[in-house]
Amino acid sequence: MSLELKQIDSNNIEVYSNMKLAGNIIKPDIPVPHARKWFFKPNHDCGCVWTDISLIELGTTIQNMNK
């Protein structure tokens, strides 16, 4: 299972897993000290089952965005 990313605006990217909205990759408007620019906010209503491959893919994507 691969993730699908859909950019909403410059601070918000929707993350889909099996065509369900799994959550968002968000960049806060106000910088948070000692935090990365981007982070994942899960959608708790999704009911998605994450595989290790999907989690690694998401982690790698966010890590590359924060470089």
Image (cartoon, helix red, strand yellow):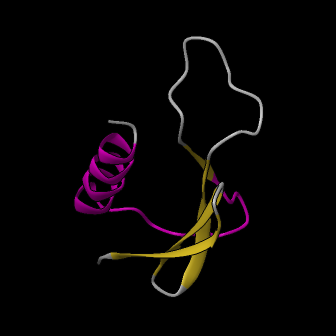
Q: Toward which corner of the image does residue 33 lie, by quadrant?
A: top right
Q: Is residue 14 above or below residue 37?
A: below
The residue lying toward the viewer, choosing from 16 and 50, is 16
Q: Is residue 57 rendered magenta in the image?
A: yes
Q: Judge left or right: residue 3 versus residue 30.
A: left
* Rendered-image quadrant of the C terminus: top left
Q: Which residues are magenta?
A: 42-65
Q: Give how far across and how far down residue 66 sits, in percent.
A: 39, 38
Q: Position of residue 65 (x, y in %)?
A: 38, 47
Q: Is residue 9 above or below residue 63?
A: below
| Residue at 55 percent of width and 21 percent of height | 35
- Rendered view: 28 above or below 61: above
Rendering coords of residue 11 (x, y %): 66, 54
Please indicate whether residue 58 sits to the left or right of residue 47 in the image: left
**Near-viewer residue (54 or 63):** 63
The quarter of the displayed image where residue 25 is located: bottom right
Which residue corresponds to the image point at 69% horizontal and 25% vertical from the top-left?
31
- The image position of residue 51, as x and y in percent, is 31, 62
